[in-house]
Image (cartoon, helix red, strand yellow):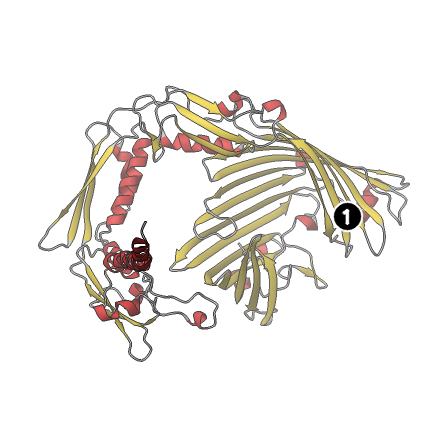
Amino acid sequence: MTACQQDISRRLFPCLQVVIALIFVAAMAAPVVAAGKLPVAPDDERWLQRRQEVEKVIITGADKISPGEIIRRMEMRKNSGWAKFGLRKSRRILRGAWDRDRQAILTFYQAHGFLNAAVTISLTKDEKTERAIVTVEVVEGPRTVWGTVEIVDTTTGIAYRTKRWLRQIKRGKPANPRLLHQVVAECKTTYADFGHPYAQFNAGWNVDSTRWDTANVTITVDAGARTYFGDVKIEGNTYTKTRIVRRELDFKPGDLYSRKKIIESQNNIYRTGLFTYTRLRAAADSVDGAPVAQGNPNFTVKVVERKPSYVGFATGAGQDKQQDLTWDYSLEWGTRNWFGTGRKWALTAKSEFIVVTDWRVLYHRFEASYTEPWVFGLRLPTTIQLAYEPGVRSAVQPYRIEKIEGELNFSRRFDVDKQVWLSFVYENVNIFGIDKPIEEILAEEGITIRRKLVFAIEKDSRPNIFIPTSGSHTRLDAEYAGGFLGGDIDFYKLVGSWSRYQMMAASVFATQLKFGWVKSHSGGPPVPTSDRFYLGGANSIRGYSENGVGPMTDGTPEGGGVIAVGNIELRTPVIWKLWFTVFGDAGNNWSNYHDMAIDDILVSLGLGVQFISPVGPLRLDYGRRVRHHNHPASDRVHLAILFAF
């Protein structure tokens, strides 16, 4: 290269760098303007690209929908008061926000039957604050409501099974395209549960284009050929025998295809507790759980196993009924997959000591448990547990109390959210080193020998049991103690509860009803105090002290025989992990059902705040009880973990 050429290169190279940089900047800036379609004047484009805050939002043309409802669905809106104090992130206009807001408003209008609604959004600069003024112009158009809805299937008899889904489309209600799409998807699931995972659906609208007031819907179905399950291959099991995984399947090769059975089979495998991960799908790729290849598709179960054997140790400080500070430990050794059969056994040792003020053993306890997951060819997990407490010689009495306990428990799960239990509990007590009747010692120590049958049934459809926002929880417990079973106590006991959770805007509306009844057998001894009902406090009727509602003896709660409680709460997330609650509690605790009266119902109202921690909500409630007969108006603060229900 000549000297002249080198000189030209030195002069051109910086110029080329500048040209390339300008081309790169233009290439990056052009898509922002073009793709975003900035709804401002050309002179304000650079101003808007600096992510401005919103000064105010102006809504025009909205007659049927309130402006507040529209603004709540927008990104581009004024900052809340919390943002001024730095407690919530400041809202700024991000690229494409106007397109997202326009689509959100249109979707909202369509969900309310305005199928031809039109929305235009424009931005202007406030000359004083230089923030953005957002103007939303709405043309609502006529509102369309649902007319008739029918499903046409001339090849199978499955159409009638979709009626419960079609009933969601209620005549006279605003026509919502998303609701129709959801109904069609649920109809597809129904057909997939009865051997037609490839059924094709076509939802046609019959709307008068001149009036746009009523939409008649016809859903036509092409069910296609029936599909049956093929072979199933198990992968990933090293410790577990293949037949143990296979028996958890709800179908066999040759059975009619059912998507519901696929989901339930996968849940069955996971609920064995043997695996950290399970997946059941067609051997080929699948779409929404339905195999692509029609006919008799083969399936593959992939699992990731947990180690069969385990050792666990736990220790820490605690509090005993009579002692302020105690220390306990537990050591457990067991297997969750004995010889790859899914059977479980465990050996546990526990001890508790008094510390600081004294050094004395309170008790030793040794437990052995064994679980058989299948009994009589049924998925009926059965657990046998034996416990032995050798007893510790009392520091003030010359005798030693030995306890032997046994429990036989059967459990059965129905669907994903339903489960039942049946248990038989046996207890025996021996006392050594005494020179008086054993009955006197048992009475002095407050010990009762329990033998009882316990039955429980539960339905839980909450997606999150710690912070429920939807679903419900229903549980019924029944106990029969004594009688033909023997023991020192004889009673019937029944406890039922129902709670429901619903979203209301951004809040959760929670309700609960609970009742309980306990009664001695005819001619039997009184119900022990530990088996009676206690009411009042952070988890029942707030504003009252713990166990402060019900029969009393010299100011000491003695427990009741009948309870009835109702609770309502409105739970609202405020900022970060903080929630705010408004609640009302009502109920009472009576000695027996003859004493019950509506006039006895106690009521309290209050407010609360919750911090959503990794271990669940930490709750601080203030309850104010309403004046009632012998209960003067008063208040109380409660600190607890988890929501009240």
**Residue 238 in which image quadrant:** top right
Work out which residue is located at the far bottom of the displayed protein and give it. Answer: 128
Q: Position of residue 235 (x, y in %)?
A: 48, 25
Residue at horizontal 58 percent and vertical 72 percent from the top: 633
Decide which of 445, 29 is in the foreground and name it.
29
Residue indicated by mark 1: 446
Q: Position of residue 122 (x, y in %)?
A: 23, 67
Decide which of 139, 238 is in the foreground and name it.
238
Q: In the figure, 359 relative to 339: above or below?
A: below
| Horizontal side, residue 435 vs residue 139: left or right | right
Residue 602 appears in the figure:
no
Residue at horizontal 45 percent and vertical 35 percent from the top: 415
Q: Position of residue 580 (x, y in %)?
A: 49, 64
Q: Position of residue 393 (x, y in %)?
A: 86, 43
| Horizontal side, residue 608 vs residue 556: left or right | left
Where disc 1 sits, the SS reads: loop
| Horizontal side, residue 471 vs residue 312: left or right | left
